[in-house]
Amino acid sequence: RQPVIAIDGPAGAGKSTVAKQVANQLGLHYLDTGAMYRAVTWLVLQSGIPLDDEPAVAELVANAEISMWHPEGQPSQISINGQNVTEAIRSQSVTSQVSAIAAQKEVRRLLVREQQRYGRTGGIVGEGRDLGTHVFPNAELKIYLTASVAERARRRQQDLINLGLGEMSLKQLEKDIAERDRLDSTRAIAPLRKATDAIEIQTDSLTIAQVVEQIVQLYQQ
Ligand code: C5P
C-alpha cells in the first residue's frame, strides 16, 4: 500500500514549501491540490463562463486535462489543456476567485477523484485544505499547519516578490488572507478543518527546516 502524508491548513501557512521538502527527503511524490483548484479557476476566467454558472463550469472542468511535473531545482510546473499556467495561477485575479470555484460540488468531486487516483500511483505528500478530512481519510500521517494572519501575510509578500509578481502591501495581503480563510472554512462542502487525528503545528516562530524535520520525524516514528 502507498503511504500518504496529508498536510492541510489555511492560506500562506507554508504548506507548499514544507510538503515539497518532506516529499524530497522521504522519496515520495508531491501533490499540490491548491494548484489544481487554481488551474481550473484560471480556465474558467479564460473561457468567459460566469463563475456562478455551475453546470457550465462543471462541464469545462470535466473535459479539462491537468498535468503537473517537478523539474529538479525549479518550481513545480502545471499545465491545463496543454497550456503552462504555472505563473498565471498565482495572479491576483485567480487568487481572489479560486475559493468561489473550489466551493462548487462538481468541481470538488472531479478534482478529488484525480487526487485520489494520483495517490494510488505511489506514496505522496499532499497539501491542501481537505486532504485529511475528505480526500485521504486513511492517511498514515495528517498534519495541520497554521500561522497567524500577520505572519502568513509576511510570507505571501515575500513569495510574490520571489515570483517576480511585485510587492503588495501587508495590509491588503492580511485582508485577502483573512477573507480566503473565511470562504474556505465556511463553505458547505469539505470546508477547511483540522482532522480530529491531525497533528497541529503552529509555525510562526519555526523555520521551514524545523517544520520539515518535525514532520519527517513524526512519519518515521
Ligand atoms: O493552497 P492554495 O492557496 O494554492 O489554494 C488555493 C485555493 O484552492 C484555496 O483558497 C481553496 O479555496 C482551494 N483549495 C481547496 N481544497 C484544497 C486545496 C485548495 O478548496 N484541497
Image (tube, grey):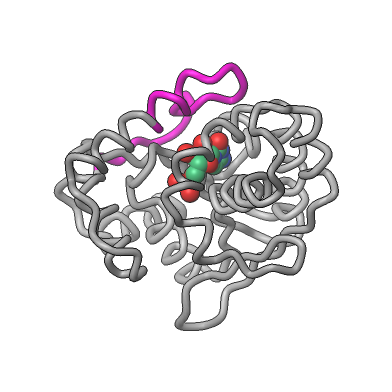
Q: At 54% from the left edge and 48% from the top edge, which residue is drawn? A: 34
Give left or right: position of 118 versus 187: right
Q: At 25% from the left edge and 45% from the top edge, which residue is drawn? A: 152
Residue 28's x, y, as percent? 58, 65
Q: At 45% from the left edge and 40% from the top edge, which residue is drawn? A: 96
Residue 186's x, y, as percent? 47, 18
Q: Is residue 211 visible?
A: yes
Q: Is residue 211 above or below residue 9?
A: below
Give left or right: position of 19 versus 40: left
Q: How many marks?
A: 0
Residue 188 lies in the magenta-colored region: yes
Residue 48 lies in the magenta-colored region: no
Residue 184's x, y, as percent? 47, 28
- Name of the residue lying farthest toward the front: 48
Closer to us: 113 or 182: 182
Residue 56's x, y, as percent? 79, 34
Give left or right: position of 77 versus 159: right
- Name of the residue lying farthest toward the left: 205
Closer to us: 178 or 112: 178
Q: Is residue 189 above or below residue 36?
A: above
Q: At 19% from the left edge and 45% from the top edge, which residue is drawn? A: 151
- Name of the residue lying farthest toward the bottom: 72
Give left or right: position of 3 versus 199: right
The span shown in magenta is 180-202
Closer to us: 179 or 10: 179
